Image (spheres, coloured by chain):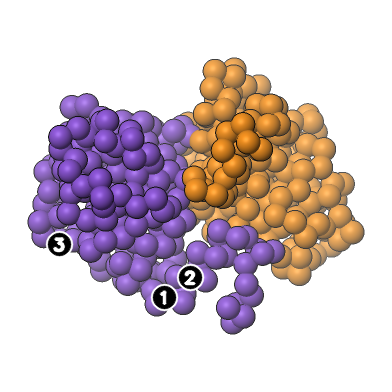
Chain colours: A purple, B orange
Amino acid sequence: MKTILYFLLDRWADFEAAYISTAVAMLGEGKFENKTVSLSAAPVRSVGGFAAVPDYVLSDVPDDYAALILIGGMSWHGEEAAKVKPLVEKTLKSGRLLGAICDACRFLGTMGALNHCRHTANDFDELVRSAGAAYTNANGFVHRQAVCDGNVVTANGTASAEFAREVLRALLVADEKTIDCWYEFHKLGLYTAPLPGMR
Amino acid sequence: MKTILYFLLDRWADFEAAYISTAVAMLGEGKFENKTVSLSAAPVRSVGGFAAVPDYVLSDVPDDYAALILIGGMSWHGEEAAKVKPLVEKTLKSGRLLGAICDACRFLGTMGALNHCRHTANDFDELVRSAGAAYTNANGFVHRQAVCDGNVVTANGTASAEFAREVLRALLVADEKTIDCWYEFHKLGLYTAPLPGMR
């Protein structure tokens, strides 16, 4: 069983976690498991007010996880967020998948983690302003909903479904066609998505 | 402050709760609050594996809530789900907003709660089969992503954003234009949605 870690900080964005976690659970059943992580064991409130009890705290994250996904929200700045950097560095160095969506992309920029891969974020100018000298890869910024380059997946905050699709592909959670069907069904909706077998 | 209740059962669908709860929190800040309810005080796992601590258990739901939203998932059948019926009946009788998405619509059908309003669900045939004689309103079934009729909002499981839009409109969480902008931004995404002021 491969473990995917979802890092949640206070006021995490519900919809940025929702598609990727359910798709992994449903398409990867029996092969992948989702686990949440936070800075402490206390429930972490989402933007929508849902209180999630983390499965792990930062200090007891298992060593054999397959991917680390940073869920966007209102707290990817300051000293609390900085505590997540060692886990991000470990993930990158060991070649495991690192995913970040919305403001978590800007956070990666501030720690120099976007300097060696094509990537996206909510807003290029905001990324440059916020990361300053730590960000040296303006040429690597791509104006797309979600970008996967090597082991790094980034997406803006309106790209929950596209982010999920890229992570599912990168982890080989299912075959390409199954992933595309899942994406179209949820993105386009029951009455617009192609019928199964008609793609 | 108006309270919106979200009923969660075991294996609730993350994405069905995510758009409505965050939109209420962001567009209705200071006027609306989101509270989760479940059958017991224990954390309720979502399909994606997130463990939500409910704010209320069924027996201590506050009397002055403004709306009840039934979040779909894997447990809207059997004796456990049946315990939610009195709260649904109270909501309908008092003219407060009742929302249901995905399998929670079928649940409403089995208790006869769709017989006096236009409505939708995941699948018409499944609704008829499951609800049997309790469902007498086949003419009221609408093949659309989400339907609002009077105080009842229903939606299929691929219609999280459309469900949110109908609930936001019905509760007057914001003005129509703000709600439409929010919907298009999240549905179409950063690079496709109309620029603010260009709709």
> How far from the left and from the top, in percent, is residue B161?
60, 47
The amino acid on which the numbered mark 3 sits, given as a three-letter code, is: Gly
- Disc 3 with disc 2 on a shared chain: yes
Residue at (37, 36) in percent of width and height: A73
Report the residue marked by disc 1.
A176
The amino acid on which the numbered mark 2 sits, given as a three-letter code, is: Asp
Q: Quadrant of residue A109?
A: top left
- Disc 2 with disc 1 on a shared chain: yes
Q: Quadrant of residue B27?
A: top right
Q: As rendered, which of B12 and B123 lies closer to the eye?
A: B123
Residue A83 visible to the viewer: no
Total number of numbered labels?
3
As helix, strand or loop, the secondary structure at mark 3 comes to: loop
> How far from the left and from the top, in percent, is residue A43?
33, 35
Please tell me whether residue A146 is drawn above or below residue A134 in the rendered image: below
Report the residue marked by disc 3.
A95
The amino acid on which the numbered mark 1 sits, given as a three-letter code, is: Glu
Badge 3 local density, few (<14 within 10 Å), some, or many (20+)? Answer: some
As helix, strand or loop, the secondary structure at mark 2 comes to: helix
Looking at the rendered structure, which numbered label has been put on residue B64? none
Left or right side of B127 for A106: left
Asked if the residue under mark 1 is in contact with the one under mark 2, i.e. CB atoms within 8 Å, the reply is: yes
Left or right side of B112 for A88: left
Looking at the rendered structure, which numbered label has been put on residue A180? 2
Instruction: Say whether disc 3 or disc 2 marks the residue closer to the N-terminus.
Output: 3
Q: Quadrant of residue A127?
A: top left
